[in-house]
């Protein structure tokens, strides 16, 4: 019988100190630290396409758009994470005592990878739903044209829609914005790897 390695636990304060010195992004989940691996070119193209489209569409509107490196704190889940794309209403709300961590997104998008898709659909979405301002969630497959769209319709109620047709135009509910799936996947080359 082999001894199981004990999981190392960190305080929030230790995580934040380590994160300041880290050259990579790390997620904090209730005392454990998980490295956030780099994305593929497809992952970056998709999240970049969405970020650019949202940034241009929401100019002069009371929202700010963030891409990949902006930390989010979810106190009810004891989770620090870095969503791929996040829209936050102005004024921005920061975690008390921090200037680098937001707490009030209304929209989050994650580009799915084989290693994170179950987490993004499950525990992470559960954590996101505990954020009072959170209204809309987009999951984008990087291996094929496939988008899952969740919209909050009432307390504890979410409407789920999914799309596979690149000619479909996706309309957002939280703010005025539309994007054709083909635009999300612009310059993305799918492979069977």
Image (cartoon, grey):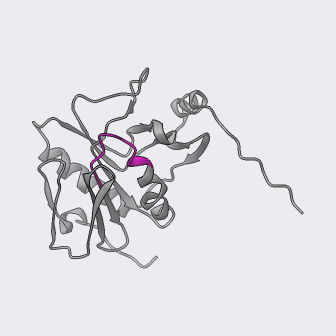
The prevailing secondary structure element of the residues shown in magenta is: loop
Residue shown at 39% from the left, 48% from the top: 128
Residue 29: quadrant of the picture:
top right
Task: Judge left or right: residue 75 versus residue 88.
Answer: right
Residue 136 covered by magenta stretch: yes
Residue 134: quadrant of the picture:
top left
Task: Judge left or right: residue 58 versus residue 119.
Answer: left
From this viewpoint, which residue is outermost toward the right?
1
Q: Is residue 183 above or below residue 129?
A: below
Frontmost residue, 140 versus 121: 121
Segment colored magenta: 127-137
Q: Is residue 105 above or below residue 97?
A: below
From this viewpoint, which residue is outermost toward the front?
155
Q: Is residue 60 above or below residue 67?
A: above
Tell me residue 6's x, y (percent). Answer: 76, 47
Q: Is residue 113 above or below residue 60?
A: below
Frontmost residue, 75 versus 113: 75
> How many discs appear?
0
Residue shown at 71% from the left, 46% from the top: 7
Residue shown at 25% from the left, 50% from the top: 51
Residue 190: quadrant of the picture:
bottom left
Task: Judge left or right: residue 58 versus residue 17.
Answer: left
Residue shown at 51% from the left, 30% from the top: 20
Tell me residue 175's x, y (percent). Answer: 15, 47
Tell me residue 72's x, y (percent). Answer: 40, 38
From this viewpoint, which residue is outermost toward the bottom?
192
Frontmost residue, 57 versus 121: 121
Q: Which quadrant: the N terminus? A: bottom right
Residue 52 covered by magenta stretch: no
């Amino acid at each position: 019988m082999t001894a199981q390695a004990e999981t190392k636990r960190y305080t929030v304060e230790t995580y934040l100190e380590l994160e300041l010195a880290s050259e990579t992004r790390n997620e904090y989940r209730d005392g454990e630290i998980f490295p956030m691996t780099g994305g593929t070119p497809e992952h970056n193209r998709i999240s970049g396409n969405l970020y650019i489209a949202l940034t241009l569409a929401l100019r002069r509107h009371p929202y700010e758009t963030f891409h990949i490196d902006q930390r989010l704190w979810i106190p009810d889940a004891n989770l620090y994470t870095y969503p791929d794309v996040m829209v936050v209403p102005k004024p921005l709300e920061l975690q008390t005592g921090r200037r680098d961590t937001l707490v009030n997104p209304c929209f989050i998008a994650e580009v799915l990878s084989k290693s994170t898709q179950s987490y993004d659909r499950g525990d992470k979405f559960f954590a996101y739903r505990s954020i009072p301002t959170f209204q809309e969630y987009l999951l984008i497959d990087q291996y094929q044209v496939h988008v899952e769209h969740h919209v909050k319709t009432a307390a504890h109620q979410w409407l789920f829609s999914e799309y596979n047709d690149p000619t479909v135009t996706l309309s957002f509910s939280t703010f005025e914005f539309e994007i054709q799936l083909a635009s999300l996947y612009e310059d993305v080359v799918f492979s069977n790897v």
